[in-house]
Amino acid sequence: MKYYPIDEALARRAKTMISFSDYVEGSATAEYRRAVDEAARLAEQQKRKVDPIHHDRIDQLLDTYSRRLAENINQSNAITARVPSILIAGGSNFPVHKKEKQNQAANTNLAEWRQIQGLLDKIRGTGRGGISADDPEAVRKLKLKLAGLERDQEKMKAVNAHYRKHKTLDGCPQLAPDEAEKIQASMARDWRKDPKPYPSFHLTNNNAMIRQTKKRIEELSTKAETEYEGWAFEGGEVQMNRESNRLRVFFHEKPDRDTCSAMRHSGFKWAPSVGAWQRQLTDNAIYAAKHLDCLRPLSGERPAPEQAGSVQEPAQDAVVGWVFYIIADLKTWADNAAERSELEHFPSFEAAKARFDELRGEPYNSEAVEPGPDGQPPARLTLGIESADGMSAVDILHVRQGENYLVTDFTRSERLRDDPMVMDILSRVSREIGFERVRVWEQADGGRQLLSVVPFAEWDNPWFPSATPGRIAAQYCTLLHECYPLPTDDEIHSGQIAEIVKSLQKEGKRGADQMALAVAGFGATFSDNAAVQKQAEALMKELARYDAPGLDEARQRRLKHKKSPER
């Protein structure tokens, strides 16, 4: 582990800008090192839990955390030292404009600090999640993972067989005494009539993981033997970089806005470090690049298969990179029923929606049943998405006692969070199927996570366009913070959003139109502020889509029946 330098002189100057107290020499460095030591302790704990093949990755994350935290602290002190507090300088001739710029820089620095703290979550998750295709040791690691899965499968089968024969786990050769005791205690709490040491769904899920891992080993092995070639297009070239496992698009000049939008929509991201648009080198990436008009080869023809690798084109109406699945009744999976609902796959949203609409009216989706272990109604009809490579899948909609719930599991996967196609899918589901509620995990005192269920319309939704009062209110508050140095307290921010939501729900479309006028005014007033212009443009799009006909019709009925002054 390596410590990086903290500028003590800068820390001392920052202290004098905000406090009359003397700076304690070395306190900034000591605070930084305490944070790094805590991260190192976490890293050592994680190393003890995972296979040694992941130790280098944990060390890299720890070093990145240490370096970026030092840079962030130094930058924070530099920002604080720019302008003194009004309590120090006094109100006379106070540089308000400079203070506003300082506050904006401080907010940016705080957002970066939060990203740095996210590295601790990556350390906790290293060795517990999937194996990236970017890893040069991916095939070897997958083979080790496969061997472990197969050992687990044989162990579970042997333990279940021992229990069937002896009706006890005493003397089971596959289990240590303390392990057998834990399993028997778990079986005693099981609500099933005839519990097993390892329920059937454990074996089924593990067997699916074995098949999936074998398939991925085969795909990566084949990919390692495939020769990829790029192509030139008007204004640039496409390169297949095997070393970094990236498909890269180089433009000779800065592309226009429409081209940048097309690249983002196709899953490419701008990488300043290499000066190119890139995404992971997969069949889907090659297919997306082949079918972008701005990347058409100089010959005018699409790249030949031998140029771009062997690519299997998806169905005509399929979403490139993602397919859909439906489970008619997820409760049959949770109950480990003898006849579980089938997992049905669909190549397009249209096909999945047609099947969803067909099943949505079934009585079981609305029946009242006892809450599950989490205290919530059990999930029944389920809609989900799965990546074309089979390595990512997530439920996005559960029907619970007649209401559509948004499932926020996608927020826990970096791959899903950062994929614009996933956000487009969620936005489309919101428009064409609709969500009534969302289950949100919130941070409580002591670091505990609390689950709350809120109406989807009131949720602040920071993830995808939905044109709901909650999202519009959150965006409006963000715009206000871009325009003015307002307090950043989370509780105050939540209260502001709640008030705006109430106003929008009360006023309906008329309230949205009034807000649009205010947003246009902010855009005109802060015409030289790029952040304000970007936020205002996004908010105007949401407001244009906002529609509350039910509210406006109800208001018209109230006005129609209102008593006249003569009465």
Image: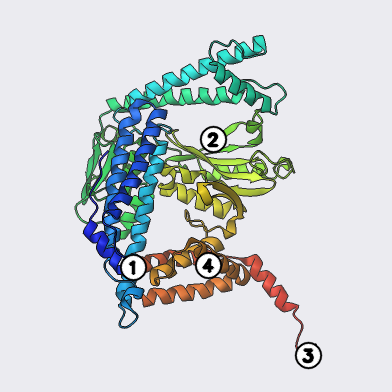
The answer to which of 192 and 230 lies nearer the viewer is 192
Residue 496 disc label? 4
User: How far apart are labels 1 and 4 at the CA level?
Assistant: 30 Å
User: How far apart are labels 2 and 4 at the CA level?
Assistant: 42 Å
Within 10 Å of disc 4 (Cα), the crowding (few <14, some 14-19, many 20+) is: some
**Label 3 sits on what residue type?**
Glu
Among the 4 quarters of the image, the one containing residue 256 = bottom left
Is any part of residue 28 visible from this angle? Answer: yes
Residue highlighted by disc 2: 345
- Give the number of the mark in front: 2 or 4: 4
Q: Earlier in the sequence, mark 2 or mark 4?
A: 2
In what element is the residue under mark 1? loop
Q: Position of residue 194 (x, y in %)?
A: 70, 21
Is any part of residue 337 visible from this angle? Answer: no
Q: Position of residue 337 (x, y in %)?
A: 67, 28
- Give the number of the mark in front: 1 or 4: 1
Residue highlighted by disc 1: 19
In what element is the residue under mark 2? strand
Q: Earlier in the sequence, mark 1 or mark 3?
A: 1
Is 354 on the left or on the right of 276, as rendered? right
